Image (tube, rainbow, N blue to C red):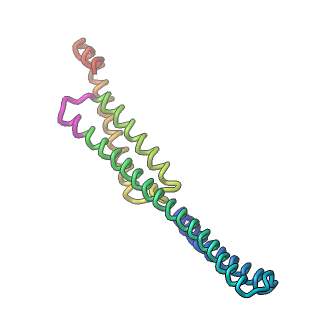
Amino acid sequence: MNKLTKFKLIRSLITISIIVIFIIGAFLVWFIFIERNVLTNIAEKITAIIAFFGILISGIQILINEIKRRREFYKQLRYSEYKSIRNHIQKFTNLLNDHLVNEPNPYLLENKLMNINNELAVTINTSNSKLFPGIIDNENSKNLDNLISDILIRTSQYLNKLMIYVKTKKNKKHLVILKLI
């Protein structure tokens, strides 16, 4: 059973529990006031039954309001996590664009790309349990992970080639520039 099915099952159980609470309350009213004849006067019985149903309905209304509040909080939390994931992807894209246009710094680029990738992975893994069940198994998520991994591998390969080039060149100027970068 996947997490989305569990979530829908829990929501159904909450709805059913509200109905069960109402049925139990109606049974108690019937049992106490009609079956056991706790009150003998018919006017007192009607007043007590109306008051009991009023209390029962107000309790159910409180429960429904709490469920609605939690759903709204859950929606806001999902939206903020969605924006966070989107911002991580945008930071990744902006970083690549900035380093392609400006003078490239391969060390800094690789470190920043790895940091953003780690932040994105943590956000997605955290969101997978409750907020976005199955997001890791989604085809788009897998494609994004493959693309980011490919970019990181190519950046590391470029950095390694640059280091090999600098080591083979015995020019001190390259070593100074590489250390400054």
Is the residue 10 above or below the residue 45 in the image?
above
State left or right for residue 152 relative to residue 36. Answer: left
Residue at image x 53%, y 54%?
A: 129
State the residue lying farthest toward the top. 172
* Occupied quadrant, residue 49: bottom right
Q: Position of residue 124 (x, y in %)?
A: 44, 49
Q: Position of residue 140 (x, y in %)?
A: 37, 57
Asked whether residue 100 is drawn in magenta, I would say yes
* Occupied quadrant, residue 32: bottom right
State the residue lying farthest toward the left. 101
Residue at image x 45%, y 57%?
A: 135
Is the residue 24 above or below the residue 127 in the image?
below
Q: Position of residue 116 (x, y in %)?
A: 37, 39
Screen quadrant of the N terminus: bottom right
Residue placed most toward the observer, 168 or 89? 89
Screen quadrant of the C terminus: top left
Asked whether residue 109 is drawn in magenta, I would say no
- Stretch of the chain drawn in magenta: 97-105
